[in-house]
Image: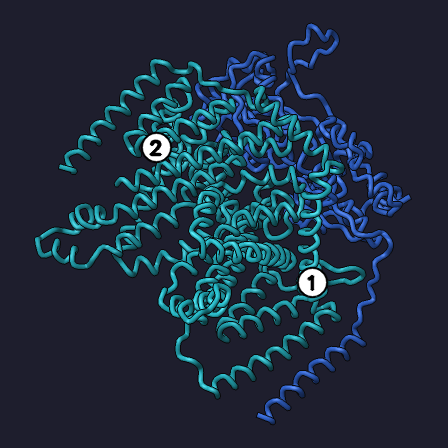
Amino acid sequence: MYRKLLERKGYFFLGFIALWYALSKIFFDKATWELGIADNTSFTNVVGDAAGAISGNRTHSPFFVYFFNPIRLFINGFVDIIRNLIATPSNGHAAPTIGWLGVIAILAFITLATSRIRMAILVITFLLGCGALGMWADTMDTLAMTLAAVLLSLAIGIPCGIWAGLSDRVLKLFTPILDLAQILPTMVYLAPLALFFMIGEASATIATMIYSVPISIRITSHAIRSLNFSPVEASISMGATKKQTLSKVQLPMAKQMIVLGVNQTVMAALSFVVIAALIAAPGLGKPVISALTIQNTGRGFVAGLAVVLVAIMLDRATSAAAMKQKAFIPPTESEKRRKRLNVSIAGAVALGATIASHFVTALGNFPDNFDIATPISNATNSFVNFLVNDVSFLTVGFKDIISIRVLNPIEDMLARAPWFMTLTMFVIAALVLAGKRIAFLTFVLLSAIAATGLWFDAMITLTQTIVATLLTMIVGVALGIWVGRSKRADSLLRPFLDAGQTMPAFVYLVPILGLFGPTRFTAIATGIVYSIPVVVKIVGEGIRSVPESMIEAATAAGSNVRQIITKVQLPASKRALMLAANQGMIFVLAVIVIGGFVGSGGLGYIVIMGSSKPELQGKGLVAGFVILLLGVAIDRVAQAASRRA
Amino acid sequence: MKLTSRRKIALASSVMISAFAMTATFQSSSKAADCGTWGIAMHAWNGYTASAQVVTEVAKAQGCTINQSTLTEGGTTYDAMEAGTTDVIIEDWGGGRWQKWTDRGAVVLVGANGNVGKIGMFVAPWMVKKYPGITNSKNLNKYASLFKTADSGGKGAWFEGPPGYTTIGEKMIKANKLKFKAIATGSEAALISTITKAEKNKKPALIYWWEPSTLFVKVPGLDKARVNFPKNDWSDAAKASGLTDYPATPLEKLATKKLMDSGSVFAKIVKNFKWTNADQNAVAADIEGGMTPEKAAQKWIKAHPAQVKAWLA
């Protein structure tokens, strides 16, 4: 019965899309609200004037003098303290206060104290690696920025997380804000932040925090909530106050999860390194961005490699520290003593190295006489040249097929039809797929987009997001099935998936640009590369969690491999597939916006343009807001649809 | 236990003693002169890098500490200067878009840097011979269909400059009544890859580009592939219907008021810095040839001592 209904729904949808397509052909290029690149609407003009008024008031309005400026100065000061310590030469000194040897010694010491010696060796090797790549100073800037953002994030995130962990009301209040912060493409809030906190370290730090604080709140509250209730109950029944229960029972029990939260916060902050360089954050993002604009893929790759090294190092070190909290067998007295001795020797060595690195310039500034960056960068460049010159005839052909057969028809349907028609069709689709409530929400969000006057560009961006998500799902599900079914495939692909998730998208933007030229498809291809790892991981996990007994039963009934996949494993992991599609789409949207740098046009291009051209500042801000509306609409519909599935 | 803790102390103290001993012998003698620490904005294009790097190297030789920060041009950088994040723009193309910031006082216009910018539209050089008259804007429509791509909606593709650069493509298309569509490219890299590939594979392309630039060395014949548009006619403001071409722009230097009032050597260097398009191209070509910006700048400085001395006077 249910199956039949679903099949009928399928037919309905085919018919619906055919009707939509036909209508869009009939009313082609009418009431599209297409806007010239340099044209403003009355609404964007109003926003532009408001932004102008805000930046004009930064020196004397009380809001700035007593609120924004103190925050900015405090964060700038905080970041500068850390940077002077490890990254930039301090006053009257040729090297930072703590030189390279000292930094390596201290970090290795901290790792040793919180986990194992193997981890400390890994930290030393990776830091030396960053130095050998010629990226020491930028790596230190990145570490300093990350450290500042993480400390501030935890200072806010852990208390808020505990609060949300203890009170349902607070959690309910936080949840929508946290959801929003996580689906918001990062490019979107750079410009508004810069308006209030100006271009510089403070804005970059706050932008990073917007991304990392929610994660820290979420994991902390989850840690408190997932505790076994009986010790808590016992503590209360023994007459402990709420405060005592929290500090003596709940927090110690949740410690491991909270340290895991630190790990996730660090990773979130690190993923922001490159994009924050757009608002003058010092660090590894700078060489990546400039490699994009002057097309030196090799240099960008070297910097990207350093980002990956730092990411792996921080990930391993912090998760090892989290694992250590888990050990249930208490160490013996002699083990404890040995460890204490090792740690104190290491501490003494680290102290000595730190002091030495402060006074000896050779130990302060990383030596630049062994250079592995140039060969790596040259090799990358010649590989990319080979791709661009000898493979691109294939890729350009593929690009043209997708552009003409898929991209253009969908763009005709969504963007080049009358706006009210597209809007109506979307609301009907949401009604059938996700129900009345979501349909109403879709109506409100899309109407808001139409009201801004950027409807056409929003539809261009949406088209690219849809096409990229479709392609991602085709490749991602295939790989996910493979990974889910074979352990070998999993261990073969995992390093690539991990690297793909930490490598900043800007790094592979340039080679993809070489392959496809400045076109909409370049942005789509980048979006696919960026979102495939998360789709593969979710789908693989879904396939793997299908109960063994179901597969055995199917095999016993004589099903072949294809039948097992299509009739058992895929239907049973339907939820995972829907989740993958949802996540994939949010990831894709974030990158399609960055695609404004390589010819995607649409909202991303307007955001980038708004940050440079004062006369289009308002339009850029509005475009950012429209991306936000689009993201929320996509996320809500996809989630509701997956709940129904 | 006793032994180990004694060993610990011994180890720690020996490390410290050796550290301090080294201090005594190696204590760095570098004492920064009173130039101070200043910032210079780094914009994306190669020519800019050349100018900014030369200024940086000259200032460093005078004992200044110079922080280079990668920033997109225009509003972003003016904001950064107002915030104190950076102090100097050595080459600005924006003909007055800094007005709001200079009016507020934190940013000041320092003067021309000697370079003259000329933006224009260029076809792939091989087309000049094959399609006679293509560099005359009047003939462009005749060839428009050659430039069609999957992205240009049935018209010729007009590859527009990066989002932050001065671009009037849509206005030019309208004023010159062309059957072209302005395509957003996004970055200098996108334009370079478009024109070099078009030239190599003998495919048509029409791109936004500018002088001074070293792309003219990399893509031979590009200088003869500029499309000539009718000059903007401002003689009768009422008659002028729209912008038909980019005007030649003297490029400007901007700096923070704080720097210019400081009396620092760096302020003097920024104020006096002036060179020609040929100078900039020489340094930019070295950078593009694989030299680091530092080395390329040093090379030029060594070869032009008189000019550098004049900036310091």
**What residue does disc 2 label?**
A437
Number of residues whose C-alpha sits closer than 10 Å to that of mark 1, classed few (under 14), some (14–19) or many (20 or more): many
Q: Residue A85 carries which label?
A: 1
Specify the amino acid type for callout 1. Leu
Q: Which chain carries label 1?
A: A
Q: In this view, does A316 lie to the left or right of B265?
A: left
Q: Name the residue located 44 percent from the left edge and 15 percent from the top edge.
A: A31
* The chain coloured blue in the image: B
Q: How far apart are marks 1 and 2 (CA)?
A: 54 Å
Residue A81's x, y, as percent? 70, 59
Which scheme is used to colour this image of the protein?
by chain
Q: Is mark 1 on a helix, strand or loop?
A: helix
The quadrant of the picture occupied by the C terminus of chain A is: top left
Q: Nearer the viewer, residue A227 or A237?
A: A237
Which colour is chain A painted?
cyan
Q: In which quarter of the image is residue A607?
A: top right
User: Earlier along the polypeptide chain: callout 1 or callout 2?
Assistant: 1
Q: In this view, does A488 lie to the left or right of B224?
A: left
Q: Which of A495 and A118 is in front in this view?
A: A118
